[in-house]
Image (cartoon, rainbow, N blue to C red):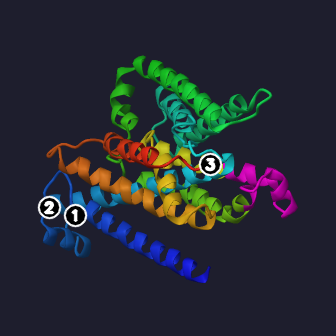
Amino acid sequence: MRGRAAVLAGGLVVTLAVLALAAAASVALGARSVPPATVIDALLSYDGSTDHTVVVDVRIPRTLLGIAVGAALGLAGALMQSLTRNPLADPGVLGINQGAMLGVTLALGLFGLSDPAVYVWFAFGGAALAAVVVYTLGSSGRSGSSPVRLALAGIALGMVCTAAASAILRMDSQVFDRMRFWLTGSLAAADAGTLTGLAPFLVAGLVLGLFLARPLNMLSLGDDAGKALGVPVNRTRVLTGVAATLLCGSATAAAGPLVFVGLVVPQAVRAVVGHDQRWVLPYSALAAPVLLLVADVAGRLIARPGEVQVGIMWAVIGAPIFIMMARRRRLAAL
């Protein structure tokens, strides 16, 4: 056991190093070609020139936001899959991202709120309401909840939320123009204000989510076994829901409704490290931003001098990975 723990701890260090490399690539590469020497000079002695401004004021906030959003969605997916014991649980599949999207659309389209620190509360409300509705619909009836029922309920609610958001956007072309990149999932609007406004919610969700690893491990044995081991079942469920809402709401408010991140990454992580949440949760929080940054950099490079939004690139990358995983082995029951 100690040898395996040492190997997994070393894997976390390696994953962190890979994340640092992905972050460096995100700062150094983009739609505008900036020589490596200029990138380093911008970091060490900023002079306000165009290239320095691109690196310091555009790419660094974008990279930090990509790390935060990726970690939030990866951890949220792992938390939800563990709590529901549903390998298909995901902020996108269960309609939570779409609920947050509808909340943001209401804030922007009906109330004219444009500050992320303000409309993030609408995202939280939409995410929380969607989670409650999906769980209620998926658990109703004699047979109770099942992975398929929860997924179907989430997909149906997601379609309703998407349709409602589309209807609101079509009422105001200016709001639609402002949100069209956000709707596909984008890190392009990142700035220091967005990071500052959302950082407290993201940090709170990350800390709370990682803190729940041990009780979620015990609940994986079943509610009765968890109670026998001293786990407060209802409190654990509520806290997990709060953590997922904080993570999904703030990530969606910042970057739009990114899908597949919280579904694919925890599945891939469990295939490598097993089902111990003490490892699944931190690995998911580190691996997801690596893939998100890689997708974002690829989107900036293949369409120079423009870019392909990270939501589109991630769908192109994430969907084949998930299909490959599903073909090679059955999704593990949780």
Residue, x 65% and y 39% (percent of image)?
A: 128
Q: Type of residue at label 2?
A: Val
Indicate left or right for 295 with 221 as reference.
left
Say if 153 sits above or below 90 in the image.
Answer: above
Residue, x 78% and y 26% (percent of image)?
A: 141
Front-lying residue, 179 or 225: 225
Front-lying residue, 52 or 92: 92
Indicate left or right for 29 with 271 as reference.
left
Residue, x 63% and y 38% (percent of image)?
A: 147
Circle 1/circle 3 CB separation < 8 Å: no
Q: CA distance from mark 2 to mark 1?
A: 7 Å
Identify the secondary structure beneath mark 2. loop
Q: Which residue is mark 1?
A: 28
Image depth: mark 2 or mark 3 in front? 3
- Upstream in the sequence, badge 1 or badge 3? 1
Front-lying residue, 169 or 276: 276
The image quarter containing residue 303 is top left
Q: Which residues are magenta?
A: 218-241
User: What number is the disc on residue 333?
Assistant: 3
- Residue 6, given in percent of the width and then of the height, sits at 53, 81
Asked if residue 222 lies in the magenta stretch, the reply is: yes
Q: CA distance from mark 1 to mark 3?
A: 41 Å
Image depth: mark 1 or mark 3 in front? 3
Q: Which residue is mark 2?
A: 34
Indicate left or right for 130 with 56 as reference.
right
- Upstream in the sequence, badge 2 or badge 3? 2
Q: CA distance from mark 2 to mark 3?
A: 47 Å
